[in-house]
Image (cartoon, rainbow, N blue to C red):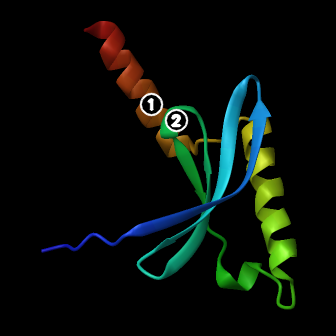
């Protein structure tokens, strides 16, 4: 039987793009930390760097600013949600249109 862990979320930044509001949140699930960017309708993209991708010696503020910059870049360059989620949304919209 699979157990589902609790997720805690802390909003660290929000911004607007093309009339929509996006939130950048730090999250923890089962002891694993990651960041997500949330957009309209609760669709999110997880930002999970590999540990070796975060340079040592960075302050928490520098890491926070880096996550915010990546989140804003993804949204402004139409890279959010990720390709897999976009494909699933298109399939859902196609099915709804056909019904």
Q: Quadrant of residue 40?
A: top right
Estimate how packed mark 1 is, as few (under 14), some (14 to 19) or many (20 or more) residues with alpha carbons within 10 Å.
some
Image quarter in which the C terminus is found: top left
- Picture coordinates of residue 21 (x, y %)? 69, 34
Q: Toward the viewer: 65 or 84? A: 65
Name above or below for residue 36 compared with residue 79. below
Task: Assign a secondary structure to mark 2.
Answer: helix
Residue at the image point whose x is 58% and y is 45% from the top: 82
Q: Residue furthest bottom?
A: 57
Task: Assign a secondary structure to mark 1.
Answer: helix
Q: Looking at the image, how many numbered discs can be counted on the residues? A: 2
Can the viewer see residue 77 in this picture?
Answer: no
Q: Residue furthest left?
A: 1
Residue at the image point whose x is 55% and y is 47% from the top: 44
Name above or below for residue 4 compared with residue 40. below
* Numbered mark located on residue 86 in the image: 2
Name above or below for residue 73 compared with residue 36. above
| 8 with respect to 78 (left or right) | left
- Picture coordinates of residue 36 (x, y %)? 60, 57
Residue at the image point whose x is 87% and y is 91% from the top: 57
Q: Toward the viewer: 26 or 67? A: 26
Image quarter in which the N terminus is found: bottom left
* Numbered mark located on residue 67 in the image: none
| 32 with respect to 95 (left or right) | right
Q: CA distance from mark 2 to mark 1?
A: 5 Å
* Numbered mark located on residue 89 in the image: 1
Estimate how packed mark 2 is, as few (under 14), some (14 to 19) or many (20 or more) residues with alpha carbons within 10 Å.
some
- Picture coordinates of residue 88 (x, y %)? 42, 35
- Pointers 2 and 1 in contact (CB under 8 A)? yes
Residue at the image point whose x is 83% and y is 55% from the top: 69
Q: Quadrant of residue 19?
A: top right
């Amino acid at each position: 039987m699979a157990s589902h862990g609790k997720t805690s979320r802390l909003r660290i930044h929000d911004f607007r793009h093309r009339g929509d509001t996006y939130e950048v949140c730090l999250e923890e699930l089962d002891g694993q930390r990651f960041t997500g960017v949330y957009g309209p309708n609760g669709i999110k993209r997880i930002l999970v760097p590999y540990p070796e991708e975060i340079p040592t010696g960075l302050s928490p503020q520098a890491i926070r600013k880096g996550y915010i910059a990546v989140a804003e870049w993804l949204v402004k360059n139409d890279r959010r949600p990720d390709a897999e989620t976009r494909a699933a949304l298109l399939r859902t919209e196609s099915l709804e249109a056909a019904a």
